[in-house]
Image (spheres, rainbow, N blue to C red):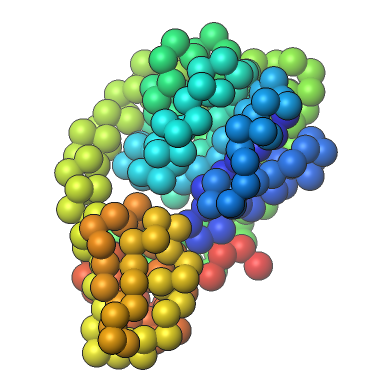
Amino acid sequence: MVIVYFSGTGNSKYIAEKFADRMQIEAHSIEENIDFGQIFDKVDTIAVCYPIYGSCVPLIMREFVKKNMQFFERKKLIIFCTQMLFSGDGAKAFARLIPNCDGRVRYAEHFKMPNNICNFALFPMTEKEKTKKPLRALEKLDKVCSDIQKGVVKKRGWNAFSNILGKTQNIAYPKMEAKARASFRTDDSCIGCGLCVKKCPMHNLELVNGKVKQNGNCTLCYRCVNICPKQSCTVYFTKKPKKQYKGIS
């Protein structure tokens, strides 16, 4: 088994690496410049972990699956998604990317993690959730690992209620994603340090004459918004952040 993950600001990385430690397997970010085909050839089960956006799989993860579809179409699957509140069918959303894979899904689970949307008033970031959510997630992960080792099959997000809840979110998200792809902005406080350019997982940003330019390929991961030393960056929501999410300490 191997687990691969995409993590914008650290939540999904945290779950993936903790799972790898408990199961004594390798964990790899899909951003790594490695031969994933060679890795997938050696295992019979691929575990994945990603943040869910509006009950949709992030663009960067969808592109990774498409590129490696020959492996996802024939391997057993374990699906983890991290969420802020309730995604409904966040794990099933991944399964929908791969034709006829339901019978090969060994386990699927959702993990509530701290909010990283740092510039939207309806989703405030609190110290309480930064402490409690990871602890509860690890408690759940211990149960998940025990189940998998015992051969227990569980598929969170597969029932009718989850499907309905997911649809209430993913009907609107594709339009949001389309708008978000070219939504990156900076203001005059930007110092042209290039950190967002270096860290962007989609290689969407470039530094031109000391100014950051975007190329219409944002995956809405919020990494740039949360790492900018001058809090100059925004994506989708245009309000500048007063407090940034720095991941789980």
The reply to whether residue 125 is in sight is no
Q: Position of residue 127 (x, y in %)?
A: 54, 69
In the foreground, 73 or 139: 73
Q: Is residue 152 left or right of residue 73?
A: right
Q: Residue at image x 77%, y 38%?
A: 25
In the foreground, 14 or 72: 72
Which quadrant of the view contains residue 10? Answer: bottom right
Q: Position of residue 191 (x, y in %)?
A: 36, 90
Q: Residue at image x 41%, y 46%?
A: 60
Which quadrant of the view contains residue 49? Answer: top right
Q: As displayed, is residue 182 above or below residue 157? A: below
Q: Is residue 72 left or right of residue 124?
A: right
Total numbered labels placed on residues in the image? 0
Q: As displayed, is residue 220 above or below residue 68? A: below
Q: As displayed, is residue 125 above or below residue 201? A: below
| Quarter that holds the N terminus | top right
Q: Is residue 249 left or right of residue 232?
A: right
Q: Residue at image x 31%, y 56%?
A: 218
Q: Residue at image x 65%, y 67%?
A: 249
In the foreground, 11 or 5: 5
Give the farthest residue toward the right.
Answer: 24
Q: Position of residue 98 (x, y in %)?
A: 43, 21
Q: Position of residue 27 (x, y in %)?
A: 69, 44
The reply to whether residue 207 is in sight is yes
